[in-house]
Structure formats: structure tokens, C-alpha cells
Amino acid sequence: MPLHPEIEPYDHGMLDVGDGNRVYWETCGNPHGKPTVVLHGGPGSGCTPYFRRLFDPAAYRIVLLDQRGCGRSTPRASAHDTDMSVNTTAHLMADLELLRQHLGIERWLVWGGSWGSVLGLRYAQTCRAVVSELVLTCVATGSNAEVALLTRGLGKIFPEPFARFLAELPEDERGGNLAAAYNRLLEAPDQAVRERAARAWTDWETATIPAPPRSVQRFEDPEFRLGFARTVTHYWGNDHFLGEGDDAGVVLRDAHLLKDIPGTLVQGSLDLGNLLGTAWRLHHAWPGSELTVVDEAGHDAGAPGVAEALVAATDKYAQR
């Protein structure tokens, strides 16, 4: 099933969400259609026009936003004086509620990819009455075990890039939480230290998560690279601000809360973030969910087979 046609927003704006933050949002498709909101990954990636094409513009009122600190939202995480203490999962969920109310939406389908799946799942568990369905890909749940895999565990599969990744850290910080250690470098007063850490972090991500050229190219932008690395390590180094306290994680633990929300999970079989079987475990803990595994696909919402499965899911839910 092909992607839907390219479209442009019919409305957009900057929403004041407090704490000095203004969040960029846009709406596309049918103003009277079924509402859906797109939660991008990262944390810190920002939305792209590609996401609009996963929905039938005649059937959906498509809402995209750049989460705090990234994309067109202000202030940007790349600025050293941006206060990251007011950029947490709780803040992002509150922003979603403010935006939903601002747009006069009662309930919406929540689409999330990678980090967006973590945010979407926790939002649905917390605000069940306003989520009609979930469509998730590159599935994650934000557990400590997932972070440990993506920072240290994959070092056994990619030993040479891992050695370079570790070498950027002080020796006494190489045995602990690597994301937290990198975040300390990315918060350093010395700009050169911050820039070097951002390059090392994104080099490690590029080495371990094969991505399409469009995703790799964005890391050549120094401002994007710095804001992205700072935001990812801020979340990963702080348990995604989920307060989990265990390797299983609260999102997976609370999967039963989703029992009345239909959901579709689309996962690439070669997504290295899925070595823990996260999508499979979530599917079996979530009554009524559907899991589609796409062979030969990695951590890429635009991969052949993945995109088609996502469009099929949104087309199906458009009829509910």
C-alpha cells in the first residue's frame, strides 16, 4: 500500500506551554476528519513532512508538533542556556493535553515512532479517555534495559565504534551510565567539550542504528547534532523521567491499562533495539494489540514494508 500524497499544512502556530517554552504545531488534511497526533522520535529529532503521508488526508485531521527544545519549537536544546529541567516526559504529556484542548479535539489517534512510541504509550496509559487508537513503530518502552543495550550492550556487536565511544569519556565514567556521563559533557560550560561530545554520541548512533541517508545527513548540522545529543542523553540518563526503578520499566508493567485502546505495532526484524523482544513482550501484555514484524527492515519508519504496514493501519483506523 503506497504512501498518501504529499500535502501542506492548512494551519500552524506556536503554543505557549509555560516555562518559557513555545511548541510548534501544524495541522494537515481534512479539518473535519478523524484527529491524529504524530509523536516524533529522538528524543529531539523533530517532525518531518514524511509523517503527513502516513495518513489519508481526506479522512484525517493530522496534527504534527515539534516537542520541547527541538525543531521549530523554542528555546532550542542546542542553546546552552536552555533550561532542560523543564523538558521531561511529564512536561511533554502536559504539552499534548494543552495542544489537544487548544485545537478543540476530544479524542485522537496517537502515532509514535521510537521515542515517540514511549511517549505515546505513557500518554495513553495516563490519559486513556482521550486516546482512540495507537499506531507505533520502531517500538521502545523507555526501560533501563533498553538504554543499557543501546549504549553498552551493542558494544559487543560493534567493538571498534564502541571503543571510540568510550574513549571520549573520562576513565572513571566509563563503567557507569554512559548516557548520563555523556550528558554531563553536553552540559559542560566549554563549547568545544560540548561539540566534541555531540559528535561522538551521534557517531555511535550512526554506527549502531543503520538509518537512511536523510537521517544521517541531519547529524552534519552542528546545531541539530548538539540539540539532539543533549536531549537524548538528558532523557536516557534520567530513566526517561518515568521513575521506573527497575529494568522492566513502568510502561511495560502498565501495559494492561491499554486493554480498551486498539493498537498496531509495526517492527522491523533487524531493528537492533528489539534484541530484548520489546515489541513482542508489549504485544503479549497489551490485550487487543496487533503486531506486524517486517523482515529485513531496521529502525526506520520509512523502510519498505514498514511504511506500507503503517499506512494500512491508519487506513483501517480511519473507518472506526
Image (cartoon, rainbow, N blue to C red):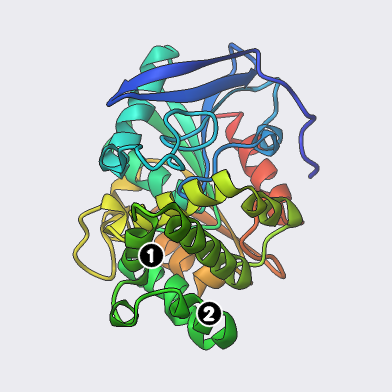
Name the foreground residue: 89 vs 247: 89
Name the foreground residue: 199 vs 106: 199
Q: Do the residues labelled 1 and 2 touch (CB within 8 Å)?
A: no
Name the foreground residue: 107 vs 262: 107
Q: Is residue 287 above or below residue 34?
A: below
User: Which label is found at residue 164?
Assistant: 2
Query: In this orientation, does residue 285 appear?
Result: no
Write down the residue under mark 1: 182
Instruction: Find residue 290 and report its horizontal and vertical position in percent.
Output: 52, 54
Instruction: Find residue 95 and report its horizontal and vertical position in percent.
Output: 35, 28
Type of the residue with mark 2: Arg
Query: In this orientation, does residue 188 appear?
Result: yes
**Image quadrant occupied by the N terminus:** top right
Which residue is painted at 25% across and 52% down in the image?
242
Is 106 left or right of 214, judged from the image as shown? left
Sequence-wise, which precedes: disc 1 or disc 2? 2
Which residue is painted at 34% across and 47% down in the image?
259
Instruction: Find residue 14 and report its horizontal and vertical position in percent.
Output: 47, 17
Disc 2, SS: helix
Instruction: Find residue 43 and report its horizontal and vertical position in percent.
Output: 45, 48
User: Which label is found at residue 250?
Assistant: none
Q: Is residue 193 above or below residue 107?
A: below
Type of the residue with mark 1: Tyr
Q: Is residue 130 above or below residue 159?
A: above
Which residue is painted at 80% across and 30% down in the image?
5
Q: How crowded is mark 2: few (under 14 residues within 10 Å), some or many (20 or more)?
A: some
Q: How far apart are marks 1 and 2 (CA)?
A: 13 Å
Disc 1, SS: helix
Is 200 left or right of 302, judged from the image as shown? left
